[in-house]
């Protein structure tokens, strides 16, 4: 048993990090920022340069800027509830900008304002589907074409202006959509790589069993209830490494892991937690049932017939439903696992002292050694 650390040194109940507080998504931030920007623009035009407006257009411009606030707020609320970008908001924003632009009498100001029609398609290109983006772009092109064509000038000047505006809109939106597609692909690759890394981090690379991290993650999804634990240690494992080499020791670990995995129930959690030790958590079993399953595990390893032959010693601990129900309301609490591990670890030492190849259990307050033939 050389090299084994104490239960306290290797506690399995490290607390998981809390989930981050939900925050506004990028599309929601876009809406939140655009609405005040439209209001500031409307106020600036009405109160700073009212001379650029058509006669009687001031109330329309001011009303449009004020209306942008509740509309954007509604879009954000619906987005947070449904999880889907609100494409109708960019349609509405495109129409609002068209109204503001049509209210301006100054030619130079209108020429500049027409380019603001790209806002709606940009929003769609960043956050909506390709079909939605094309629909918004078509709407913006129609509105921009009409506004640009209405500007003073001969036919050739108006046609050139329309072509320039349409080209700016189309190229800007198409470029942003292409960039978004590349970013989405990069994010998808990063997420896939993270998921693969998480899966590897939760498994022991040699045996394929859960490790401590994977065991904690699996326990978090389990409801409270009766819970048993079996801590197993391969007897005289150091002799295998010393006499046959570490390659043979790895083969023994893989073989024992396979035997244990074939013996436990489907709902049980089996982990290799370091060196030659294996930890099994058994939900829904009473103490005597946990001890019986531990004995089956011991017997299965002893009867495996592989070379070199090995045996295991085991310590058993269990908690009743009433004990675990008070410890956690969601999943099995880390303190429960630490307690079971510490109790099973003490009994494992006892099994080693009493001759190895045996199971020691402690149901209730009475110490009971499960009889073995080893």
Image: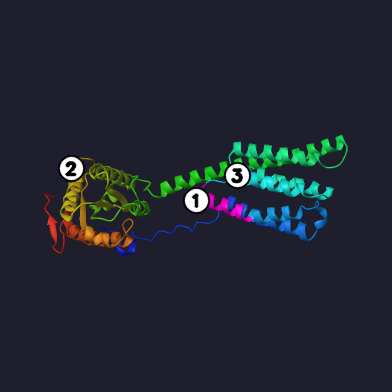
Q: Quadrant of residue 159?
A: top right
- Residue 150, percent from left and from top: 81, 40
Q: Is residue 174 visible?
A: no
Mark 3 packing: few (<14 Cα in 10 Å), some, or many (20+)?
Answer: some
- Residue 55, percent from left and from top: 81, 52
Disc on the earlier residue, 3 or 1:
1
Residue lying farthest front? 56
Of the numbered discs in the image, which one, if any, rests on residue 325? none
Q: Are marks 2 and 3 in contact (CB under 8 Å)?
A: no
Secondary element at tag 2:
loop
Q: Is residue 372 visible?
A: yes
Residue occupied by mark 1: 81
Secondary structure mostly seen in the magenta stretch: helix
Is 330 situated left or right of 321 in this image? right
Question: How many numbered marks, from 0 up?
Answer: 3
Residue at 20% of width from left, 40% of height from top? 305
Of the numbered discs in the image, which one, if any, rests on residue 303? 2
Residue at 83% of width from left, 50% of height from top? 106
Residue occupied by mark 3: 88
Q: Is residue 179 magenta?
A: no
Residue at 28% of width from left, 61% of height from top? 336
Disc on the earlier residue, 2 or 3:
3
Mark 2 packing: few (<14 Cα in 10 Å), some, or many (20+)?
Answer: few
| Residue 373 vs residue 44, the one in the foreground | 44
Secondary element at tag 3:
helix
Q: Quadrant of residue 8?
A: bottom left
Please state the extent of the stretch shown in magenta in the rendering.
69-83
Q: Quadrant of residue 95?
A: top right
């Amino acid at each position: 048993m050389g090299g084994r650390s104490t239960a306290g040194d290797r506690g399995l109940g490290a607390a998981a990090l809390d989930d981050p507080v939900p925050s506004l998504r990028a599309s929601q931030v876009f809406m939140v920022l655009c609405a005040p920007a439209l209001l500031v623009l409307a106020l600036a035009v009405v109160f700073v340069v009212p001379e650029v407006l058509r006669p009687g257009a001031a109330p329309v411009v001011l009303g449009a800027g004020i209306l942008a606030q509740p509309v954007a707020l509604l879009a954000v609320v619906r987005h947070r509830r449904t999880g889907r970008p609100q494409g109708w908001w960019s349609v509405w924003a495109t129409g609002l900008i068209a109204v503001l632009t049509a209210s301006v009498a100054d030619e130079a100001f209108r020429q500049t304002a027409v380019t603001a029609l790209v806002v709606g398609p940009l929003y769609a290109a960043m956050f909506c589907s390709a079909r939605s983006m094309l629909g918004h772009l078509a709407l913006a092109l129609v509105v921009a074409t009409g506004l640009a064509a209405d500007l003073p000038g001969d036919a050739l000047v108006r046609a050139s202006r329309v072509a320039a505006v349409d080209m700016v809109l189309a190229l800007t939106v198409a470029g942003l959509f292409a960039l978004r597609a590349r970013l989405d692909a990069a994010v998808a690759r990063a997420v896939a790589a993270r998921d693969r890394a998480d899966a590897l981090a939760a498994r022991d690379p040699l045996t394929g069993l859960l490790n401590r991290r994977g065991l904690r993650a699996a326990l978090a999804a389990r409801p409270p209830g009766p819970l048993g634990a079996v801590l197993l240690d391969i007897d005289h494992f150091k002799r295998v490494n010393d006499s046959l080499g570490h390659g043979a020791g790895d083969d023994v670990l893989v073989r024992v892991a396979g035997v244990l995995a074939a013996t436990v129930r489907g709902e049980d959690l089996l982990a290799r937690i370091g060196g030659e030790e294996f930890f099994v958590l058994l939900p829904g079993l009473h103490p005597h049932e946990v001890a019986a399953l531990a004995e089956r595990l011991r017997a299965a390893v002893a009867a495996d017939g592989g070379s070199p032959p090995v045996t295991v010693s085991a310590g058993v601990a269990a908690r009743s439903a009433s004990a675990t129900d008070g410890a956690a309301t969601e999943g099995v609490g880390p303190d429960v696992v630490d307690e079971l591990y510490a109790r099973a670890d003490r009994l494992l030492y006892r099994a080693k002292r009493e001759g190895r190849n045996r199971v020691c259990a402690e149901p209730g307050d009475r110490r009971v050694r499960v009889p073995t033939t080893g």
